[in-house]
Image (spheres, rainbow, N blue to C red):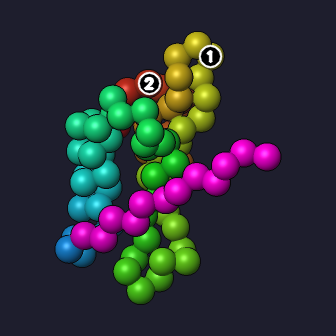
Amino acid sequence: MTAPRWIIHLPTTLTSLDGAVILATALRESLGHVTAIDFGETTLSEEDRQFLHTRVWCDARLDGAGRCRRRNDHDGPCGVTGE
């Protein structure tokens, strides 16, 4: 049995999904070196609908190259650089 992982809920004053994605991307770019943060599992939710999560990135495993960094439901092949 493994220990449970903890989720940090970080409320913002942003009012659009696009703005929240931009902030999540900026956090990933600036804090990507912190191994305790699993940015591939990042989801967003509206303040009053926190039960409904929107996945930000695809995060599919790539052969020897880590994980896909493109937006979830992207067109074309997975890749190590974001859109």
- Residue 78 screen position, x and y as percent: 53, 30
Q: Are marks 2 and 1 in contact (CB under 8 Å)?
A: no
- Horizontal side of 20 relative to 54 (left or right) equals left
- Horizontal side of 41 relative to 45 (left or right) equals right
Report the residue marked by disc 1: 63
- Residue 81 screen position, x and y as percent: 37, 27
Q: Residue furthest top?
A: 64
Q: Within 10 Å of the Cα at label 1, are there few (<14), some (14-19), or many (20+) other Cα atoms?
A: few
Q: Residue furthest bottom?
A: 48
Taking depth in this image into account, of 31 and 49 the one nearest to the observer is 31
Please tell me whether mark 1 sits on a helix, a strand or a loop: loop
* Quadrant, the C terminus: top left
User: What segment is highlighted magenta in the picture?
Assistant: 1-12
The disc label shown at residue 80, or none: 2
Please tell me whether mark 2 sits on a helix, a strand or a loop: loop
Which residue appears at 29% of the width and 61% of the height?
A: 20
**Residue flagged by tag 1: what amino acid is it?**
Asp
- Residue 65 screen position, x and y as percent: 52, 17
Q: Is residue 8 magenta?
A: yes
- Whether residue 2 is visible to the viewer of this picture, yes or no, is yes
Alpha carbon of mark 2 to alpha carbon of mark 1: how far? 11 Å
- Horizontal side of 13 relative to 39 (left or right) equals left
63 is higher (above) or lower (below) than 74: above
- Whether residue 72 is visible to the viewer of this picture, yes or no, is no
Which residue appears at 64% of the width and 54% of the height?
A: 4
The disc label shown at residue 28, or none: none
Q: Within 10 Å of the Cα at label 2, are there few (<14), some (14-19), or many (20+) other Cα atoms?
A: some
Q: Main secondary structure of the magenta part?
A: loop
Q: Earlier in the sequence, mark 2 or mark 1?
A: 1
